[in-house]
Image (tube, rainbow, N blue to C red):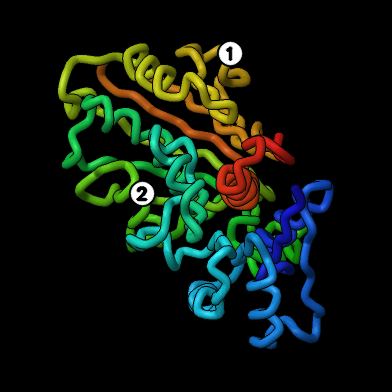
Amino acid sequence: MRYTVFVDGQEGTTGLQINEYLAQRADIELLKIAADKRKDLAERKRLINASDVTFLCLPDAAAKESVALVDNPRTCVIDASTAHRVHPDWVFGLPELCPEQRAKIRASKRIANPGCHASAFILAVRPLIDAGLIAADTQLAANSITGYSGGGKSMIAEYEAASGSTALKAPRAYALALAHKHLPEMQAYTGLTAAPIFQPIVGPFYKGLAVTVYLHPAQFTRTAGPADVQKILADYYADEAFIKVHPVDLDTTTVNGFYDVEANNGSNRVDLAVYGNAERMLLIARLDNLGKGASGAAVQAMNVHLGVTESLGLV
């Protein structure tokens, strides 16, 4: 079967990558909007309602505007903005979230694509909450280091303009008011009753992301070491093609003790690794912020919704 797909916001970083994923697929017909019609509501409405699936790769306000244009009940909307991620009428597009999530994505016509930092954090923490190792009211802390492509076209241009100079060579911490836009989904889909303390950092590299969650065994509901945490994760994701839970082994998961943030670039994969000892631990989740953190996740959710092979077009 052949499906029609429209990317509203096809010139943005996420939209371009989705188009690249889908252009090679024989089962997809991509509907394109002319450059001079990109802000034409009537033309956008026509293409949205002519599609089986529309991806919204737009700012929040524009995404809401596009949703209001939908009058074809068969059109599935996958929104890559933050506008609908915790909306009760939308399904969170993270198939690995829990056993029932794929059925929800399959049945829904409104799917909210997860944020990059949020995907890594949720995939790391949700199994520990579900296993009862961490109580829902635990105050967790985490940081994330990400490539500058996560900031979109303006940040990409800023870094590329600085190429060859000393500007922007050092990592830059941001969201220091501790109110990052991914916090609502990080709380909602882990089951935490309080938002984590979360502080991201942008680095001088194009893409790649690693979220580090700080685990204090004193906060656990029972005695557990790194191997116990690793087993909870390994059992939870045992059948997941895109998620690899590494053994507790510093030598095989690092290069001379250094963790490679870019190791999953160009893929839809997620790596989970546990480090530390009985007194303190780190849980790291690594992904490509433009792959599983954005466009790859959107395509994966589309595949689940359409009932085709989930990994189709993804690596």
Question: Residue at 62% of width from left, 37% of height from top?
Answer: 310
For residue 251, above or below residue 138 = above
Q: Secondary structure at mark 2?
A: helix
Q: Which residue is mark 2?
A: 186
Give the x, y percent position of residue 49: 64, 73
Disc 1 residue type?
Thr
Question: Residue at 39% of width from left, 37% of height from top?
Answer: 100
On screen, residue 5 versus residue 231, left or right, reads: right
Q: Secondary structure at mark 1?
A: helix
Disc 2 residue type?
Met
Q: Which residue is mark 1?
A: 252
Q: Tell me the quarter of the picture where residue 229 sits.
A: top left
Distance (Cα) linking label 1 and label 2: 29 Å
Q: Please say whether residue 112 is visible from this viewpoint.
A: yes
For residue 275, above or below residue 53 = above
Question: Residue at 21% of width from left, 42% of height from top?
Answer: 139
On screen, residue 75 versus residue 284, left or right, reads: right
Q: Mark 1: few, some, or many residues within 10 Å (few <14, many ≥20)?
A: few
Give the x, y percent position of residue 74: 57, 63
Q: Tell me the quarter of the picture where residue 5 sits.
A: bottom right
Q: Please say whether residue 289 is visible from this viewpoint.
A: no
For residue 101, above or below residue 131 = below
Question: Residue at 46% of width from left, 64% of height from top?
Answer: 82
